[in-house]
Image (cartoon, rainbow, N blue to C red):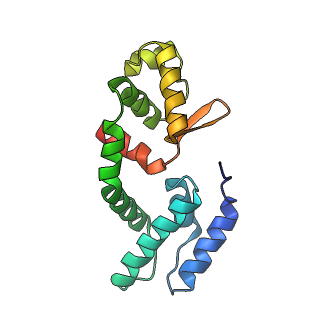
Amino acid sequence: MGLDKIDENKSIDYLKSRFESSGITIDKGTTKYLLSTVANIPYYIQFIAYEIWQALTLADRNKVSANDIDRAVENLLLLKSDYYWELTNKQTVNRKKILYALSQSVTELFSKQTADNFNLGPVSSTQKALEVFVEDGIIERKNEIYEFSDPFYSTFIANNL
C-alpha cells in the first residue's frame, strides 16, 4: 500500500518545531534541503532528523547545517550498506545496469539512447526487470515514472555500481 507524502510546508513546520523544542534551530532552506535529500518520505525524515539531533546534542551545538544533513546521510548509508550490498548482489548483471540507469535519474528507460548508454539490452528485458523490482518493493511506479522506494538505495547504487 502506498502512502502519499506529507505536504512540504507541514513537514517544514514540524521539523522546525521539533528541533526548536530541544533548543536547536534549523532555517527554512536547510529544512528544504533535508526534505529533498530524503524525497520527503516520512520514515527517512524522522531517521535523518534523529541522527542530526543526536549528533548536535553530543557536540553541544544548536544549529543544523547542510553538512549535518550530509553526515547523517553518510551514516545511514554506512549503517545500511550490508543490506544494500545483499540486495544488489541478488540481482542479475542486466538488472544491476537498470538500477544504475535509474540511479542516474534516467526518465526515458525504454528509449534506444538509454539502452545504448547503459548497455541495457532489449526493451522487453528492461520491462521484465522493472516488473520484478516493483513486485519486490525496490522500485515504485507512478504513472510512467519509475523511482526508488528507498532514496538512499539510489544513492548507494549511483556510488557503488
Q: Which residue is depicted at the point 40% across and 78% down?
A: 54
137 to 23, vertically: above or below: above
28 to 87, vertically: above or below: below
Residue 3 as seen in the image, left or right of residue 118: right
Point out residue 130 in the picture as x, y percentages from the top left corner: 51, 28
82 to 142, vertically: above or below: below
Q: Which residue is depicted at the point 33% across and 60% down?
A: 79
- The reply to whether residue 42 is in sight is yes
Give the quadrant of residue 104: top left
Residue 60 as seen in the image, left or right of residue 140: left
Quadrant in which the C terminus is drawn: top left
Point out residue 61 in the picture as x, y percentages from the top left corner: 39, 83
Point out residue 13 in the picture as x, y percentages from the top left corner: 65, 72
Q: Along the line of sight, which residue is nearer the eye, 120 or 124?
A: 124
Give the quadrant of residue 95: top left
Point out residue 87 in the picture as x, y percentages from the top left corner: 36, 42
100 to 8, vertically: above or below: above
Q: Which residue is depicted at the point 43% across and 43% down?
A: 154
- The reply to whether residue 106 is in sight is no
Tally of numbered discs: 0
Q: Which residue is depicted at the point 54% across and 36% down?
A: 135
